[in-house]
Image (cartoon, coloured by chain):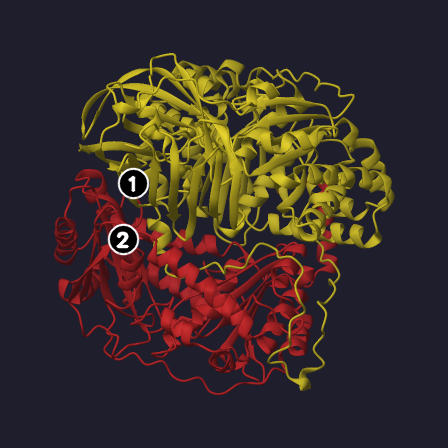
Chain colours: A red, B yellow
């Protein structure tokens, strides 16, 4: 192909000064060249070079989430997501965000059931800033009574906003935790991520410090650096900033036996914030390591992913009995779930929608789905994965996710390949095995009159 | 009945289903960049880690930017084709730019280019709107179209294997759109409500006034869509715009990602080779008015508790090489949280949540603007400080530290804008649409690097002209206008754009006949509809309490309201208690009226000012919040009649004259029955509304709409 002169020159210059490019054209979609190693204190490091643009993502996953919480100490994982922005020995409160923004980068963090993540995207030459910021809070988070009190209030406010005052908030949170999972045998997933206010109120700085010492130690974390960097320099910086941080005590195992032994179960919530009734069906699924995950993921899309999905077509378009439908497959380290939800239109009983969903599922169990539907679901999944891999941060997150769920960052590629290899028989088989009324938690939301002041 | 005006405090309504479904709470509630903090105690730090550097490490040497290779060519019909090969992921982006946009709208149909863009994907010779969306969804792709001032863009993102399909779809929607009437009706309605929402935002009102004054009436960049112009647009206008502007020699096609350049050329010539070229009408860019002195254009927004300030003037044309030093200047003056405006107005003075500056770069001449949103009481101080900072950048050489930080930010953050194939395509297209050589992009970092402190001062003196600035302030004239006198001459306008005089703002007792005896005990139930969906109910009860009236309002659902208002049988206010909440935001007030004074307390969320005591002298006839509905119910109304009633605004603690204009009559059917109503427009409040009042006395509210918001209250039941 023809290149304009100036451009060829730039590329030649770049070749002369840049380290040899590792990221060649991938042999298969989802292939990300990477290396993985461990520091003496147990910190796991994933490095993936990508020299297409001078950008770098620094992404730390702590292998702690709501699943690690014990009765009486819920809400800690999420509380930490807030505490981690309250300052550390060398970084003042609020300064983390300011330093990243002023360097031209962006940052955030989030809490899930199995992990909590913290990440920055930065100009390549500010990689050291990202590593320094993450190391400083890993080694010296400022856990003070004042910060704890302050963030406890913020978390309570968030709970009010997102759960207590949000229409369907309580129904959805419960459908992802306390209703499908048996809280006695699988407390790990059988309580809400956002936690109990009583537990948070009772927490003192010593509890929080203990939680930090166990779960935010280097041995319980993985650091991913993805982008345009010199691997020798990165290794040196990581050694300099992280190697001296003490390893921390062993992390207690998460137990989740017989998670779905309460199914089938049905629960009704009165919701003063909701004006239309809704239905949420949660099905018990295997852990992410199971090969059944691949067809289940596609089946979820066929049922309610997008406007041409089966349930959208039937409930929203044809019968107009639902305002909105959705499906959320939630695969975890331990047993996962599939949530299928619908908001009923005015005058429609949730039972009517439940009957239609079950009728559609019965059809899938008896007849399977069409080849065209399977093809479309595969296209959508492939596109979703590949789009995620366009950015350094997207790659870092994908490598982390594969490492956590399958114990191997290379599983980004195999996970995609296995999903694309799913057959029509696989789909029908998992529908028969998992998407049955016996394996289901049913949550019905009924609008309630507004609570008086 | 009782129209619920206080709802204007809460018009941040969404159907939060999707948000509530997010399985992981993703955003740490870190506050916006905070004021300077105390040093942090080093809890948990171990002494044996003393080697850890205590300061953030300085930047490493900058890495070179390897801009992806690209090919540029022009098809025989004049279509420019740019191909960027970037093979990192098997994805392709195809963007077709038509080099005509909102600046090409015929003035009577302002908004046309925007509607054309939205209608492109709503039907072609081969596919209906639904077939188009299903086709692209089926391959996991996206197809979008949008309009800017200078262009219309159609963009498809697909997996690399589906590139031929992307060509087919983009070709279809660009060359053979059918603009079906039913889809047009939906798009126009949606645009009207988006437009009204925009006009309700003080920042939009300020921006519209600013470009009008900077460019002058009649300049394509000061042209703005209005409800009147959008309503005028019909299918023939769309077809005419399409015929006139969609021609091959007025278009740029950018294809980027995991593509083969030769194959793309072939696909492009198959899809677009037959597309005709031919002259395209260019907008007439008149000279922006020459300005001899600074002037304040004040837009009166009654009840505003903040002022929106814009200070600026015309800037440069895109090809001007001073763009690079001006970028550095802008970064230092107001381009971020470490800039001078932010540090001084927010961190040092605490006057505002944010203060910024910006340099626009359209195809023709751009502008420079500094902006801030500040509390009423500091409006004059903030404006003076903004002008000071614009003078300072002219008078003083910037420090080496400021210069280096600005340059390092601009060169370092640039690559974050070209990470994906789509971002690269957009950057290249932008440079091309500005008529610039590609080195504007490939040499961007080097050119920023070369800027010196002397360059910054030179361009500051040449282009930054506070003494000739257009100054726009949107706020409550009764609160802030007097303080601004002496800074610069002032012209005043209403939010709708009409000239205003100080005398127009004087608030007097209402001159309307009121038949207080017409009121009778009642219980009215309303349904709250958001985007056509029922999302709550409101009950308003009027009951006797001795010789007086007690009106109680209870609303639940998407927002909550409780209020109790007492007034005499002659409609003289006694007291008003109110509690409003939506989500975690709560506003309460407890007010009493006696002897021409309103006293009590108001509690606002911290970001709106927190708790405060109220003690204000008010003009005779002033109503307390939440009683104006009963006043109107008893007033004498007729088509064409306009009544201005002074009302106490609990949030600002001031009195504003609220005007009710009966613009006509309408027959309305609601679940409560069929009513002959007066249509009444409400103005002089931050959130404008339309009321439909029963013609029979008392004139209870049958329906209430909030301008620009998808929110309606409708009478469901009337009981005694």
Quick one: SS at disc 2?
loop
User: Percent x, y for residue A124?
Assistant: 66, 60
User: Percent x, y for residue A445?
Assistant: 22, 54
User: In the figure, is residue B428 to the left or right of B656?
Assistant: right
**Circle 1 sits on which residue?**
B552
Which is more toward the observer, A432 or B508? B508
Q: Is residue B451 above or below residue B501?
A: below
Q: In which image quadrant can residue A52 be found?
A: bottom right
User: Percent x, y for residue A46?
Assistant: 55, 71
Please identify the quadrant where the N terminus of chain B is shown: top left
Quick one: SS at disc 1?
strand
User: Percent x, y for residue B339?
Assistant: 71, 49
Q: CA distance from mark 1 to mark 2?
A: 16 Å
Which is more toward the observer, A129 or A398? A129
Which mark identifies residue A451? 2
Please identify the quadrant where the C terminus of chain B is shown: top left
């Amino acid at each position: 192909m023809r290149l304009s002169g100036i451009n060829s020159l730039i590329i030649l210059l770049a070749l002369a000064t840049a380290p040899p490019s590792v990221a060649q054209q991938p042999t298969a979609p989802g292939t990300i060249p990477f290396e993985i190693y461990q520091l003496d204190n147990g910190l796991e490091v994933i490095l993936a070079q990508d020299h297409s643009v001078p950008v770098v993502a620094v992404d730390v996953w702590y292998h702690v989430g709501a699943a690690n919480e014990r009765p009486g100490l819920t809400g800690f994982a999420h509380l930490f997501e807030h505490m981690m922005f309250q300052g550390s020995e060398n970084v003042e409160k609020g300064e983390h965000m300011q330093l990243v923004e002023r360097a031209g980068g962006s940052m955030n963090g989030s809490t899930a059931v199995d992990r909590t993540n913290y990440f920055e995207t930065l100009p390549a030459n500010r990689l050291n800033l990202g590593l320094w910021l993450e190391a400083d809070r890993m080694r010296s988070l400022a856990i003070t009574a004042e910060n704890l009190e302050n963030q406890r209030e913020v978390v309570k406010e968030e709970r009010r906003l997102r759960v207590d005052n949000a229409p369907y908030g309580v129904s959805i949170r419960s459908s992802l935790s306390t209703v499908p999972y048996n809280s006695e045998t699988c407390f790990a997933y059988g309580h809400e991520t956002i936690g109990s206010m009583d537990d948070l109120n009772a927490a003192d700085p010593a509890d929080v410090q203990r939680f930090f010492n166990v779960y935010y130690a280097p041995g319980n974390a993985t650091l991913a650096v993805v982008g345009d960097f010199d691997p020798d320099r990165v290794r040196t910086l990581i050694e300099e900033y992280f190697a001296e941080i003490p390893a921390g005590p062993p992390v207690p195992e998460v137990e989740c036996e017989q998670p779905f032994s309460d199914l089938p179960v049905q629960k009704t919530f009165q919701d003063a914030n909701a004006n239309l009734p809704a239905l949420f069906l949660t099905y018990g699924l295997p852990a992410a390591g199971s090969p059944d995950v691949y067809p289940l993921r596609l089946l979820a899309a066929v049922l309610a992913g997008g406007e041409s999905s089966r349930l959208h077509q039937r409930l929203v378009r044809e019968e107009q009995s639902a305002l909105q439908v959705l499906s959320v497959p939630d695969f975890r380290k331990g047993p996962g779930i599939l949530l299928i939800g619908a908001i009923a239109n005015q005058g429609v009983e949730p039972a009517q929608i439940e009957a239609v969903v079950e009728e559609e599922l019965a059809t899938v169990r008896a007849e399977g789905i069409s080849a065209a539907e399977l093809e479309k679901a595969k296209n959508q999944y492939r596109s979703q994965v590949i789009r995620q891999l366009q950015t350094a941060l997207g790659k870092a997150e994908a490598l982390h996710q594969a490492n956590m769920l399958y114990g191997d960052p290379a599983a980004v590629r195999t996970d995609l390949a296995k999903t694309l290899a799913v057959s029509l028989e696989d789909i029908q088989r998992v529908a028969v095995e998992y998407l049955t009324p016996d394996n289901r938690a049913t949550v019905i939301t009924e609008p309630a009159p507004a609570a008086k002041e | 009945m009782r129209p619920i005006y206080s709802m204007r405090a809460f018009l941040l309504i969404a159907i939060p289903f999707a948000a509530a479904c997010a399985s992981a709470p993703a955003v740490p509630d870190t506050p916006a960049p905070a004021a300077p903090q105390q040093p942090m105690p080093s809890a948990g730090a171990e002494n044996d880690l003393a080697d850890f550097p205590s300061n953030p490490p300085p930047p490493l040497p900058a890495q070179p930017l390897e801009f992806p290779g690209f090919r540029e060519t022009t098809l025989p019909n004049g279509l420019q084709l740019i191909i960027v090969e970037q093979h990192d992921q098997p994805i392709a982006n195809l963007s077709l730019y038509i080099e005509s946009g909102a600046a090409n709208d015929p003035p009577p149909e302002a908004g046309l280019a925007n509607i054309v863009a939205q209608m492109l994907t709503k039907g072609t010779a081969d596919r209906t709107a639904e077939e188009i969306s299903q086709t692209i969804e089926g391959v996991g792709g996206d197809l979008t179209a949008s309009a800017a001032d200078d262009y219309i863009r159609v963009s498809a993102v697909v997996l690399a294997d589906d590139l031929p399909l992307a060509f087919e779809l983009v070709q279809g929607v660009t060359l053979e759109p059918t603009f079906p009437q039913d889809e047009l009706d939906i798009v126009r309605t949606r645009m009207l409500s988006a437009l009204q929402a925009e006009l309700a935002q003080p920042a939009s009102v300020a921006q519209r006034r600013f470009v009008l004054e900077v460019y002058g009436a009649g300049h394509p960049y000061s042209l703005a869509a209005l409800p009147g112009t959008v309503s005028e647009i019909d299918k023939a206008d769309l077809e005419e715009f399409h015929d006139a502007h969609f021609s091959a020699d007025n278009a740029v096609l950018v294809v980027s990602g995991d593509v083969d350049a030769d194959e793309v050329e072939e696909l492009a010539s198959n899809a677009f080779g037959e597309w005709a070229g031919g002259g395209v009408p260019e907008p007439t860019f008149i000279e922006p008015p020459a300005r001899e002195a600074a002037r304040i254009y004040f837009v009166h927004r009654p009840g505003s508790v903040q002022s929106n300030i814009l200070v600026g003037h015309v800037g440069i044309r895109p090809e001007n090489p001073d763009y690079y030093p001006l970028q550095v200047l802008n970064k230092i003056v107001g381009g971020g949280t470490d800039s001078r405006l932010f540090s001084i107005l927010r961190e040092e003075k605490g006057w505002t949540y944010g203060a910024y500056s910006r340099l626009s770069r359209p195809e023709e001449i751009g502008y420079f603007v500094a902006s801030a949103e500040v509390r009423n009481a500091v409006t004059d101080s903030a404006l003076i400080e903004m002008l000071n900072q614009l003078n300072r950048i002219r008078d003083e050489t910037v420090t080496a530290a400021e210069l280096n930080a600005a340059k390092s930010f601009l060169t370092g953050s640039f690559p974050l804008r070209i990470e994906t194939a789509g971002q690269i395509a957009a950057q290249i297209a932008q440079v091309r649409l500005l008529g610039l050589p590609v080195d504007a992009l490939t040499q961007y970092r080097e050119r920023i690097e070369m800027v010196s402190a002397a360059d910054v001062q030179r361009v500051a003196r040449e282009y930054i002209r506070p003494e000739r600035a257009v100054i726009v302030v949107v706020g409550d004239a009764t609160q802030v206008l007097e303080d601004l006198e002496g800074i610069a001459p002032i012209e005043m306008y209403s939010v709708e754009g009409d000239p205003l005089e100080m005398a127009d703002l004087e608030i007097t007792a209402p001159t309307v006949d009121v038949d207080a005896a017409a009121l009778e005990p009642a219980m009215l139930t309303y349904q709250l509809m958001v985007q056509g969906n029922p999302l709550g109910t409101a009950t308003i009860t009027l009951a006797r309490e001795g010789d007086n009236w007690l009106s109680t309002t209870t609303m639940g659902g998407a927002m909550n309201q409780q209020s109790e208002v007492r007034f005499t049988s002659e409609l003289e206010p006694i007291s008003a208690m109110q509690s409003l909440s939506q989500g975690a935001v709560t506003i309460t007030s407890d007010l009493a009226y006696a002897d021409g004074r309103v006293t009590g307390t108001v509690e606002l969320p911290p970001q709106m000012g927190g708790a405060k005591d109220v003690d204000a002298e008010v003009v005779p006839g002033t109503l307390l919040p939440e009683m104006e509905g009963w006043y109107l119910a008893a007033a004498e109304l007729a088509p064409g009649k306009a009544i201005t009633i002074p009302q106490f605004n609990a949030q600002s603690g001031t009195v504003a004259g609220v005007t009710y204009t009966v613009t006509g009559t309408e027959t309305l059917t609601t679940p409560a029955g069929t009513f002959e109503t007066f249509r009444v427009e409400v103005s002089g409040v931050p959130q404008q509304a339309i009321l439909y009042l029963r013609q029979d006395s008392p004139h209870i509210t049958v329906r209430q709409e909030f301008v620009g918001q998808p929110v309606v209250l409708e009478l469901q039941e009337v009981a005694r």
